[in-house]
Image (spheres, helix red, strand yellow):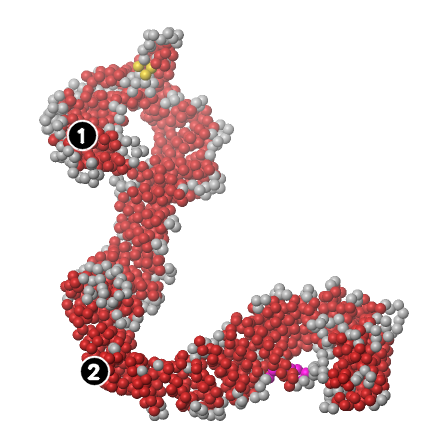
Amino acid sequence: AVEMNDEEPLPPAALSLVFPVCARALLLPKSAPASIREAALGVLAPHAAPGVEGLPRAAAARLMLTVMATGTPALAAAAHALLLDIAAGAAEDSSPAAVAREIRRGLESEFCAVRAAALAALAVAPPILGEDADAGAAPTSSSSSSAVALLFLARYDPDEANRVAADSVWEAYGLAGTDLAALVSPAAVLSYLSHPAASVREAAVGAFADAVAALASGVAPVLAKLFAAFSANAPKAAPAKPDDPFAMAVPNALVAGAARQAGNPQGRATIMRALGAVAPSLTARDLPLVSTFLTKVLGDEDEGVRDAAMNGGKEMIELHGAEHVQQLLGVYEGYFDRQANNNSAGAAAQSQASSDNVRQGVVVFLGALACHLDKEDPKIRQILSRLVAVLSTPSEAVQRSVANCLPSLMPALNDEERRALVDSLLAQVTAGEGYGDRRGAAIGLAGAVKGMGIGSLKGFGVMDAIKAAVEDKKNPDAREGAVMAFEQLCLRLGRLFEPYVIHVLPMLLVCFGDQSVNVREATISAARAVMGQLSAQGVKLVLPALMNGLEDKAWRTKQGSVQLLGAMSACAPKQLGACLPQIVPRLSETLIDTHPKVVEAATWALKAIGEVIRNPEIQALSSYLLGAIAKPAELTLPCLEVLLETTFVNTVDAPSLALIVPVLSRGLRDRKADLKKKAAKIAGNMCALVADAKDMSPYIPLLLPDIQKALVDPSPEVRATAAAALASLVRGMGGIDEHFAELIPWLTETLQSDGPMTERSGAAQGLAECLAVLGAEHFEAMLPEILAGCHHPAPYVREGHLTLLRFLPLALGQLFEAHLQEALAEVLTGLADSDEPVRDAALGAGRVFVEEFSHSAQSLDLLLPSIEDGISSENWRIRQSAVELLGSMMFRIAGASGKVHVEGGSDDEGVSTEAQGRALSGSLGENRHNDLLAAVYALRSDPTAVVRNAAMHIWKTVVSNTPRTLRAILPRLMERLIAGLSAHNDDRRTTASRCLGELVRKLGERVLPEVFPILRGGLESGGPETREGVCLGLAEVLAAARKDQLAPYYADVVPVIRDALCDPEESVRNAAGSAFDAMFRHGGADTAADIVPALLAKLDTDPVALEGLKQVLRAQPKILASVLPKLASPPINAARAGTLGALAEVAGAALPPHLSLLFPPLLVAMGSGDPEESTAAAAAAAAVIRAVPEEAHYLLLPEIVNGVTDSVTAAERAAAAALCAVFAKEAPCFDAKDDVPQIIDVLFELFIDPDEAAMTAAWTALGEVMGCVAKEDQARFLPDVRKAVDTAREKVRRQDKSAREILIPALCLPKGLAPIVQVYLQGVLSGKHAEDRESAAEGLREAVLSTTTAAIKPHVIPITGPLIRILGDKYPGAVKSAILGALAVMIDKGGLALKPFVPQLQTTFVKCLSDPARAVRQRAAAALGRLMTLQPRVDPLVGDLLTGLKGAADRGVKEAMLRAVSGVFAHAGKGVGLANVARAREEVGALVAAAGDEGTRGAASLALAHIATWLTEEERGVLIDELSADRAGVDGEEREGRAAVLSAMARTSPELLLAAHAAPALNGLAKAAKDDRVPCRCAAARGLARLAVASAAQSGPACPYLPKLLPVLSRLLRDNGSEVREAAAGALKRLTKEHPEAVAPHLGSFVPALADMAVGDRSKEARHYADRALRHALQIYDVPNGLEMAQAVLKAGGDANAARGRLTDVVLRRLKGLPDESDDEEGGTWATLAADQDDDDEVVLGD
């Protein structure tokens, strides 16, 4: 079997079997897997080398040439190498001549690469020319001459590189010095003129011409062979088959036409080119013969052959025409003569088309010959006429040839003849019948203008005529001809026509959108011609206009601009390279245009640009590039992948860049990191592929921003690739030129920006790469600025510069080593930075330093001192980083990766080897190695965990045997530990002490005898730092040693610890406490017995003893049980209180069980009169509160609360209240959610405390407690506060039942609501539910009612403003009603402090009068009335309200406005003008009479009653008379209204009625009492009672009206209507309550009726009022023997005795047992003036 990886050659026999298989595999179609062909080449490769037998080299050479012609570029490259090996070993082949022959056949390939490979192979192969010739022998046989002919042919290869290689081979074969005529005959080359490969034919033309020129006999002997070769390639008629029965039935002409064979037109054309090439060798004798032959060839059926013959004839005429003009003229004129004489014969001989072709060609020859005639020769005009006629020939080659002849003939014409010629051509251009006519005329016109000069364009009106034809919308042929004229003028005149281009472009833009296809195609050709002739200046003139055309809204203009831009692909390479950077991006944008025609034009334009690419690799990839530009989202990635896979052999030209750069830019802007990385990589390589960096210059502004954006990409791979690309661009462009002028400043600015860390990292990487490109001088100039940035105040700037230090060594290499020390110093400083990103950047830089510069002793000398300093740093971050850097360095030296972590196990286990240890010692030296190991071992005990872990990892990685290593480094380690114990830095002392403990654990008895003396001596003679370090070390030693190991040293250690506990320095005492803890674990109670009593004994004499005792308790809190009883026994003085507080701070979890023992004596001490003792006790209690852990919460708070409730003295209660505040502020276990409700409840109990100090302390404490609760969380305690306020108000009410106001004393302090006001406000402002907001507003109302005006004044603005804002929002009516109630109380209590809010409040209240909710309307009306006490101008409001009454359609709104009118007149009637009073009396009085519902009637009655107060006495009397009059025709509702008004007036102004209007008022009410309508009788009952009360108040028992009023009321008590009875009973209850002495003489008139009602009335409400009226009338509760007095009254006889039967002793006792309560006059029956249940008239009236 053949192994694919076997590089040994096969035996010849095996190879003979394998070779055909490999050949077949190599010739598989392209669809087959490429790996098969690659494998086949791999098999053949070992056998092609020289010296290897068995390979058929001739066949192999032929195979390789075939593979190169048909295979992929990669396969062709491999085959090329194999072909060279085959050729090099050809001498060892059995038939080297056959090998050479096969290789020479490659020279006949149509592929340039194949010919180049064949030449390269011939250069290394033996120089064999013939079949049997030896290497280097001269050619003799025919085969040799054929070989020489091929080599000679290769010297004229179309490719210059191949020509050079062929010349080398020619010389190598020894042919350079030989006579060419002897080597190569023209006949040998002649056959290659008709070769199938175009490149061979092209080379044969030159070779044939030189071979002919070398002949001494001239060209004559060759002409016959040349003519014969032409005939051999000419078309031939196929003979008819003799057995075809239909052969004679078909016309001869058709048979001939059908049976003709085309021959070889390419060969014939090449022969004609060869004939033109040998024109210099023609003699005078040859000219007629050649001219005649050319004339015949002009009739060839192939246009290419005719063109070649015409060109050959023109070359001949150009060379020989001047000398033989007449001879040649005769030949061509003779043709026309023969045509005229032999017309019929000629027609039979050749077709008309062929004859026309010949005639046209001869005319062209005549035109070319006419150039050699004298200007005055008359034949010129004759020839010119024939030339113009030939312009109609439908052959562009003929037309161009004619045009070429015209310029030289123009000087022979005068101006008139020129004008006539121009006019005729213009006419033909615009009106020619066929396309050929118009195009020929356009070509001829251009030739004529060229001959006449550029001035003829204007002189003969050429441009105007063409422009007019372009604008001829009716004639598409004229437009087409005019555009062709533009094209030809531009081609013929070249740069001379450039000034007209700017005027031509608009016309071309129009024609691009022409409806005629022919016009559009002609425009495209014209555009290419125009663009192809533009100079650099012309491009600058044209390009802006085309760019502006892309912005045009008309799609046809946009399409034309796009097509013109695409036509710029015809520009010269230099101009094309300059404009493509602007063109391609704009064309790319046009690909997404909305119009398909524009998109199609843009696609065509980009394709046209792609076709001018000269780079073969890019040309092969143009489809990928154009696809990526057209569909960037889909095809950018495949395009970039293909670009990366392509191996570029040739340089990249400007058109290639124009297509590549947009794709790269799109890739760099893509979101995908992989895409950006690939694009950046290609962009970086671009400068290496261009031949001239200037070609890249236009694209730098496009690529640079995208690379800069990629440089700050989140992906590190993208940033790295972008940095490399940026450096490559800078290098390729020759440094910082004008394109990169802002690059370094931008990198520096980004490096220092306050953006994401990735941006600074990318900028650092890019700057490092650029500095590496710019060289040492630039870097050293910038280094001071870089180092200074590491100390910048801004952390992000420091991070950026340290990140730059990380990348600089990687980019600069050894150039950076000279600056290593100063850079490392900055890195170590950065390791201690307070900002973590800065530390990370510094650590990264340090790691790079170690990786890059730990390879030599010199570098280690630079690195190690700084690292060793970092290990000993006071900053743990520096230590951590220094340890990591040390580890990296040691890992690198030892050859360890450092990535293996040993988890768990013993410290003795590691992964190092002895060899690694020797490597470290060898590189570092034995002493330095031990020093570093000692430092690492010590850092294993560092206080910082990350430092410990890093040191442990290093130790396990570089130490193979820990005990042996410790013994080796013990002297150095002890020196380091002792120095650490005496260091000033805490961390170093702690590290040393812990390490010492670890040593004790590991080495035990071997180290203790040495350690204890050192420690004792340090404690006795050292400074504070040393003593602290010694104690720490002692603690570690005691903790590490076993009990049996310490026994011999116990007596020495205890005094040391005892003395250290009383050290003056706190740090020493702290360390001594740790030592005591460690010792206590070994000695237990014995240790405590040796130390604690001594400390207690020193408490009174040595102040430091207390601190020592604290350390003991901190170490062992359980000892508190033995200390506390002595200290907490009462009484507690200031000193003992201070001691208790100090010990509580350290007791911690041991304290809670003793709280009940501590707090009572502390509260007593806090309440003592001694300020010092009180202050000390308060501090001790606070310390206890702070010391109690969270889990003991359930013990602490009850102790404090009990102090408030159980304390006997006011001072103790005040102290307990203060502790509540301390608890909230300082207790770790304080939980606001659970604790604040309890504290609120208990402190509110003190809000009504009789002792002012206790009350004030509780108020202050509650403020501090609520201050501990976030403002937004205070609303949750609203229920608790409301409950506490209600409870306090109830207690106050019970204390003084007669008080009109219920005031809570604590809330009456200055700023009394301060502790709780935020609870209400937050509830109102941020309550989760409407009910919460309503409750908060009601609670606020209660709180305001409980305080005084002076106390509320500071809260007016903070409370009123939020309440007004809430009223303006959309909340339920209940919320608004509650807020209105609170505002009404605020108006009463706040007084003038509310003056600033009056306008807002008035507007708000008036708005609320129209609210849908009735409660809101009622309370708004009440509040509005109260507000008027603060409003100096009342009239406008009254006017507005009265106006509103007229327009109010809703009864509820009308009722609210009436109540508002009532309130205004009740509170500010004095300020209402007489006009408004009169208006109000009329309008409200009308409403009383016309009211259709009880609510409106009641409100109107009340309003009219208040209005009446401010009427003049006369007007008031008139009103009362009207109300009392008994007029006919008054309906029941009006009577109800009158009665209600009289009742309301009796309530609002009874004194006025009694003083001036008693009789009519009483009469009116008495009539109402007899009315048949229940509301009238109810109103009468209330009114009469009010008047009775007022009369009794004025006259007492001598009141003149009571005898008249009481019988009426008594009668109403027996009314059939329960409402009437309830009203009458309620009225009597009030009368008897307020004036019992006045009614005493008249009991008989109403007591029996009351007794009947109290015992037997069906109405519960009536019985309720009757009970209380009897209780007050009989004065049952007023005196202790009230019951006996009542019984005596009832037994005394008289009218009252009639009630005795009802009022039995049982009933009287029941009345006696009724609860004491405040009788609400506004509830029940009295509130029937249409008031709500939750809102009464008193609110409106303000009574």
For the residue carrying disc 1, how many other residues have a C-alpha within 10 Å: few (<14), some (14-19), or many (20+)?
A: some
**Amino acid on which disc 2 is placed:** Pro
Q: CA distance from mark 1 to mark 2?
A: 95 Å
Determine whether, in the image, residue 207 is placed left or right of residue 567: left
Q: Main secondary structure of the magenta part?
A: loop
Q: Could you say whether the residue bearing mark 1 is in a helix, strand or loop?
A: helix
Q: Is residue 1101 left or right of residue 481?
A: left
Magenta span of residues? 1299-1305
Foreground of the two, 1450 or 144: 1450
Instruction: Point out which mark residue 391 bears.
Output: none
What residue is at 33 percent from the left and 20 percent from the top? 302
Magenta stretch containing residue 1302, yes or no? yes
- Specify whether residue 1509 is in view: no
Please identify the residue farthest to the right as the structure is shown.
1528
Residue 931 place in picture, x, y as percent: 19, 70
Circle 1: residue type = Ser
Question: What residue is shown at x 47% (from left), y 92% (from top)?
Answer: 1170
Which residue shows up at 29% across the image and 60% down it? 804
Which quadrant is home to the N terminus?
top left
Q: Quadrant of the C terminus?
A: bottom right
The answer to whether mark 1 and mark 2 are in CB contact below 8 A is no
Which residue is nearer to you in this view: 466 or 1472?
Answer: 1472
Q: Is residue 790 magenta?
A: no
Q: Which residue is mark 2?
A: 1013
Disc 2: CA contacts within 10 A as few (<14), some (14-19) or many (>=20) = few
- For residue 16, the mark is 1
Instruction: Give residue 1350's position: percent from left, percent from top.
Output: 60, 82
Q: Position of residue 989 (x, y in %)?
A: 26, 76
